[in-house]
Amino acid sequence: MAAQKINEALEHLAKAEKCLKTGFLKWKPDYDSAASEYSKAAVAFKNAKQYDQAKDAFLREAESHENNKALFHAAKAYEQAGMMLKEMQKLPEAIHLIEKASMMFLENGTPDTAAMALERAGKLIEHVNLEKAVHLYQQSANVFENEERLRQAVELLGKASRLLVRARRLDEAVVSILKEKNMYKEIENYPTCYKKTIAQVLVHLHRNDYVAAEKCVRESYSIPGFSGSEDCTALEQLLEGYDQQDQDQVYDVCNSPLFKYMDNDYAKLALSLVVPGGGTKKKSPAASQNGVSQPAPQGGSQVEEDDDEYAGGLC
């Protein structure tokens, strides 16, 4: 089957070359027919899993389309050549061709297709090169934003923000999350603004910037519905615990379902949040009886107060 497909591809290549030849009665190459034959050859090579030859055929198709001033079809061929490189595990080269295709889509006046190509490229490279994926998602978001398609833009910004958090590029993540939040305000998706405020606070606290975290919450009171939401209550408790260096209170808030079921990268931030100079995380009652003193929780029971009173006193 593979040999048959390869022979079929070679026949199409020969036809394509014939289309490009000129002579006494044929002054100009037939780029349109050549592109069609190269495309058929590329598909046949692809089906035979001859990805290197398929890539070359797609590139020659792209060149023929360019010579024929058919930018959209040329961009599609470059994108397909990139996908062949992806099959060959040559991701940097693949991304380069897809970015080239995206630029041609923009030049052709089809920005949506350009943005979607960049998004696909981001997904391809994400598990190999986080920084490149962030750049591609941001580029794609910018294209959608320029077209005033904010819902698509903010979704891609969200991907970039999460990757920045994962890469521990927290200063950049702060900027990205704020941009997300402002876009959600613009499209009046207020509940998601609350979640972005939580993300902002977690990132600021991991940057040891309590003032910036508090400012985020304070500024969010102007968002409709925020002040009466569970998100607001939880954030106030979190900041109170952080400010009072109460690791137990911070631990309780960050382990609540509201935080644990956020996007995974933010949930990890919550679970790893440590108060500088604060007490240890919650310990079992057995651990407390081993002589390790802990701050008594506010509003604790009488039994807990009695335990504190006699802790270590009988040893």
Image: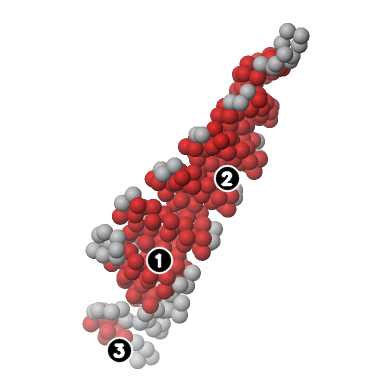
Q: Quadrant of the C terminus?
A: bottom left
Question: Does residue 254 lie above or below 84 as drawn?
Answer: below
Identify the amino acid type marked 2. Answer: Ile
Q: Residues within 10 Å of mark 3 (few under 14, many from 20)?
A: few
Q: Is label 1 in a helix, a strand or a loop?
A: helix
Q: Secondary structure at mark 2?
A: helix
* Mark number displayed over residue 311: none
| Residue identified by numbered label 1 | 201
Q: Residue at x 54, y 44 (%)?
A: 122
Residue with the mark numbered 2: 125
Q: Where residue 99 sits: x, y (%)? A: 59, 40
Whether residue 5 can be seen here: no
Q: Nearer the viewer, mark 2 or mark 3?
A: 2
Disc 3 target residue: 309
Q: Which circle, 3 or 1, is nearer the viewer?
A: 1
Of label 2 and label 3, which has the lower sequence position?
A: 2
